Amino acid sequence: MNTKAAVLFLIFSTFLARAQAEVKPNALFSDNAVLQQNIEIPVWGDAAEGEKVSVTLDGDTATTVATEGKWQVRLKPHSPGGPFDLMISGTNTIVVKNVLVGEVWICSGQSNMAYDFKGVQNAKIEGPLANYPKLRMFKVNSPGASTPQTQLAGSWVECSPKTVEGFSAVGYFFGSDIHKSTGLPVGMIHSSVGGTAAQLWTSLSGLEKEPALRAYVDAAKQMLQNDKGASEKYLRDMETYQTQLKEWEQTEGKAYGAALNAWKAASKSGGNSSPAPTPTVPKPRPPSDPGAKQPTSLFNGKIAPLIPYALRGVIWYQGESNSPKAFEYRTLFPRLIADWREKWGQGDFPFLFVQIAPYQGNPPELREAQFLTLKKVPNTAMAVITDTPPKLHPPEKELVGARLALAARALAYGEKLEYSGPEYDSIKLEQNRAIIGFKHVGGGLIAKDGPLKGFLIAGEDKKFVPANAVIEGDSVVVSSPQVPKPFAVRYAFLALPDGNLWNKDGLPASPFRTDSDSMTQDISPKNKTMLEPTLPES
């Protein structure tokens, strides 16, 4: 080795050793972060073995020593406020700026949670009004992984008319409602992937606690054996994609946008018969996530790195991908909730979820599994959206966010308000009628926009027929001349619910059936029609 090469090697070795020794916080602790108020604040990251690490926030300092390349401290509970600097020191010093202390929520699930603000029904009206510098969103960009990860990709972004387009729409409307109702800073950590099932979002140890989910445990272990660096390659490909996308947006994207706007304007005035323009250079496409379809992978890559970030609770919109196994979802979904709560160690924090929308491919049995989870798992709430159009991805995300926010205001912040539509609670059989009792009647039960509809009734033969239904106080009395001795009642129990039972607080009732125990197997193309209500020929 010549002298010049030796010097270069020495410089590189020194740089590499220094880089390996430098303190590196988890990406959650970056500029514009929001930390949870009035609870111990964990801060963690990587550092060299034995390195002393010091973390300071608003005069409160905590120190530790890195072990096996990892460190973590816990700052004292802090009242809401800011902005503050968060200083993290070791052999190097990192100053995280513009940090607020307020309320932190995770928003997760599949495509309806991933749905960007720019696609919502009233984006052009709401977008210019989205000027909330104390509302921030952290979008997790990490891929799935075969083992739990500690680091992740992503950054905090302040909400403004320029940035809101890239926010989760449900996360934005929920977060802005909480910000306005509490007056506190709000941080939304967005971690969701379209087309994904709940077993992907549950840890291996969590799945192992439920024998009925053994098949997913076996699949996750097989994935672990097969993983040969696919996740690392995805990260490299994602970095390349993000660079290419930024370059495209600054060059071709601007020109294409201008041409498209001009074409739209000409089309509106009736002076344009040419086809819509297309970009000269195609927009870069993101790489395929190798771990996005395997059990535990999204928990490992997109949830595990968030733990134990202090939070208030979770909002969740998922279930469509588990529709073919709706009976299993009765077990899987409660297990996911318990798993997250166990891993965070913050007790039974609020877990608020959305009942899947009316859509021909969304079976009523999945909504039922969600409803049964609500009845079974403490400190949960369910936003019912049967009044949205029959679409897999309804654009009315403002309504979804608002109903989740109502639940948060009641469960997490103690406001005295009705946050749920009527929930089936009991059935009492009297001669030729069934009396259905409800919880969450609020100011009273009502039939919205006409006579009460959507109720079916059956005798012991389980042949369901349309029923007469009348509101009496906090109950609905259901009967039919065709059923002299009732056995069971169903309400709006269809892929496309057709019911109009609400409470006076403006919230719709959840679909239900009183014979829910009759479901003992999952839906399949062969038996799906057997699980649908049988209507008489008209």
Image (cartoon, grey):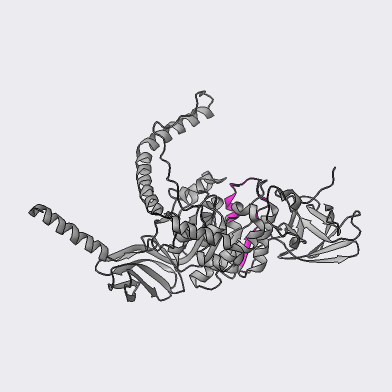
Asked whether 441 or 533 is in front, the reply is 533
Classified by dominant secondary structure, the portion drawn in magenta counts as loop
Residue 327, position as x, y percentages in the image:
67, 59
Q: Is 270 placed left or right of 325 in the picture?
A: left
Asked whether 64 or 420 is in front, the reply is 64
Residue 252, position as x, y percentages in the image:
37, 35
Residue 240, position as x, y percentages in the image:
35, 46
Instruction: Specify the quadrant of the image occupied by residue 70.
Output: bottom left
Q: Does residue 167 show up magenta in the picture?
A: no
Q: Does residue 394 show up magenta in the picture?
A: yes
Instruction: Specify the quadrant of the image occupied by residue 377.
Output: bottom right
Q: Is 535 placed left or right of 397 in the picture?
A: right
Does the rendering let one see residue 399? no
| Highlighted magenta segment, given as a residue range | 380-400
Position of residue 496 relative to residue 416, above or below, is above
Residue 513, position as x, y percentages in the image:
76, 59
Quadrant containing the N terminus is bottom left
Does the rendering let one see residue 129? yes
Quadrant containing the C terminus is top right
